[in-house]
Image: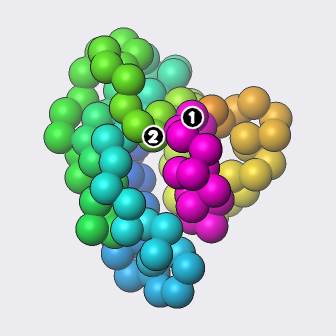
């Protein structure tokens, strides 16, 4: 099981990857949206924003998200770490139910190029 520090490092790495992206990926990452990522096995939630092509984590709190973010992710810590490392494909994890992504329809269309 990944630790909360490993999950935070994975989110930081994902943010760095988004900031260095180009083309359609950079355009999709340019959204300005509230974001939550619930780490189900640790029962901890990272909250923050996707803005300026980066993920900004503002807080980590116990339990599921207290407020409904515009983009909501939920997964086990190991899955987050594996996806960011390129060892787990988002589409496969999403199709099998290991990862949940909820967002508005237009945001989902833009986010698919990130994932």
Residue farthest to the left, as pictured? 58
Start and end of the magenta stretch? 101-115
Dividing the picture into quadrants, the one containing residue 21 is bottom left
Distance (Cα) linking label 2 and label 1: 6 Å
Residue 72 covered by magenta stretch? no
Q: How many marks?
A: 2
Q: Residue shown at 45%/40% (left/top)?
A: 71
Dividing the picture into quadrants, the one containing residue 68 is top left
Dividing the picture into quadrants, the one containing residue 94 is top right
- Residue 58 higher or lower than 28, as above or below: above
Q: Residue shown at 70%/33% (left/top)?
A: 98
Determine which residue is flagged by label 1. Answer: 102
Q: Secondary structure at mark 1?
A: strand
Q: Residues within 10 Å of mark 1 (few under 14, many from 20)?
A: some
Q: Residue shown at 80%/48% (left/top)?
A: 92
- The reply to whether residue 48 is in sight is yes
Determine which residue is flagged by label 2. Answer: 71
Determine which of the numbered discs, if any, sits on residue 39 in the image.
Answer: none
């Amino acid at each position: 099981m990944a630790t909360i520090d490993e999950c935070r490092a994975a989110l930081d790495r994902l943010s760095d990857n988004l900031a260095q992206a180009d083309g359609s990926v950079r355009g999709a990452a340019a959204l300005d949206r509230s974001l939550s990522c619930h780490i189900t096995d640790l029962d901890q939630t990272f909250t923050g924003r996707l803005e300026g092509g980066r993920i900004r984590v503002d807080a980590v709190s116990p339990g599921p998200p207290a407020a409904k973010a515009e983009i909501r992710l939920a997964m086990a810590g190991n899955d987050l770490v594996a996806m960011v490392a390129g060892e787990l494909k988002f589409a496969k994890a999403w199709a099998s139910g290991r990862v949940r992504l909820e967002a508005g329809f237009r945001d989902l269309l833009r986010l698919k190029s990130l994932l």
